[in-house]
Image (tube, rainbow, N blue to C red):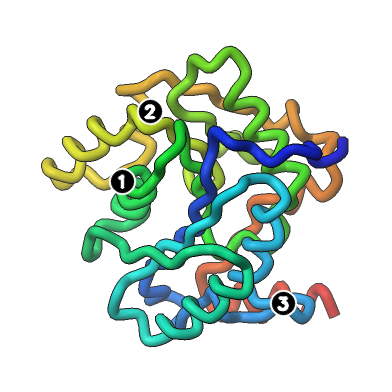
Amino acid sequence: MPVSSVKQHAIEGYIQAGGHSSRMGQDKAWLEIEGSTLIERMLTAMHPVVEKISIVINSKNQNYKKYEMLAERWRAEVIDDLHEHRGPLGGIDTALAYCQRQSALILACDLPFITPVFLSFLCETHLEGNRQEVTVPLDRDNRLQPLSAIYHLSCRRPIRQMLDNDNLKVDQLYSQVRVRQVDFVEFAHLPQADRFFINLNTMEEYEGLRNKRN
């Protein structure tokens, strides 16, 4: 399945790099896999698919300047997370606050094997019928992947209510909006599908993946 030759105009891309990576012990976006940093791999996956890309980070991030320099090279933008210690839900709210188009493609910074083909498929699925407010894939084990999903601007109101109530569990948003769950079988035929949602939370996971690849 080829990547769509026309970038999506109704969807903007947002890479969530604002976490403190406390379990990793450092900013994991700058760890390297196969010669490229994780953040660069995310940009590489998104760039052919959407017209505008932003990187969401904490304004106090010690690598802020590095992010700005990287974003400039990719013609992307760095935006400050509007929330302190509010997790992925706060990052999604930040993306929707800045988003000027219909929807935001949200991607975690630590999914090294996400591909443009998969993201193109996800965008096309989201736009089919134009009814769903969230399009979220499930992995092979039937687990939702909220940080490789698409959120319509209409999600911001319930997200704000959740934040006000200190309810930070992203999956609890799904009972309040129209959701298109994309079963793994729908994209299992895509190259590397079984690796799309491999993510890195600890140094042990990172070293294990590097050793496996060597």
Residue 90 lies, in percent from the top left, at 29, 52
Residue 47 lies, in percent from the top left, at 67, 55
Where the C terminus falls, by quadrant? bottom right
The residue indicated by pointer 1 is 97
Question: Is 56 drawn above or below residue 20 in the view shown?
Answer: above
**Looking at the image, which is closer to me, 41 or 209?**
41
**Looking at the image, which is closer to me, 132 or 102?**
102
The residue indicated by pointer 3 is 36
Q: Residue at x 12, y 41 (%)?
A: 165
Question: Is 83 drawn above or below residue 49 in the view shown?
Answer: below
Q: Dot 1, how many residues are within 10 Å of its Cα: few (below 14), some (14-19), or many (20+)?
A: few
Q: Are marks 1 and 3 in contact (CB under 8 Å)?
A: no
Q: At numbered mark 3, what does the secondary structure look like: helix, strand or loop?
A: strand
Q: Amino acid at mark 3?
A: Ser
The residue indicated by pointer 2 is 174
Q: Residue at x 71, y 34 (%)?
A: 121
Q: Residue at x 36, y 22 (%)?
A: 177
Task: Indicate which label's residue lies in the foreground, 1 or 2.
Answer: 1
Identify the image quadrant of residue 32: bottom right
Residue 5 lies, in percent from the top left, at 80, 39
Q: Amino acid at mark 2?
A: Tyr
Question: Is 155 drawn above or below residue 98 in the view shown?
Answer: above
Q: Amino acid at mark 1?
A: Ala
Q: Residue at x 72, y 51 (%)?
A: 48
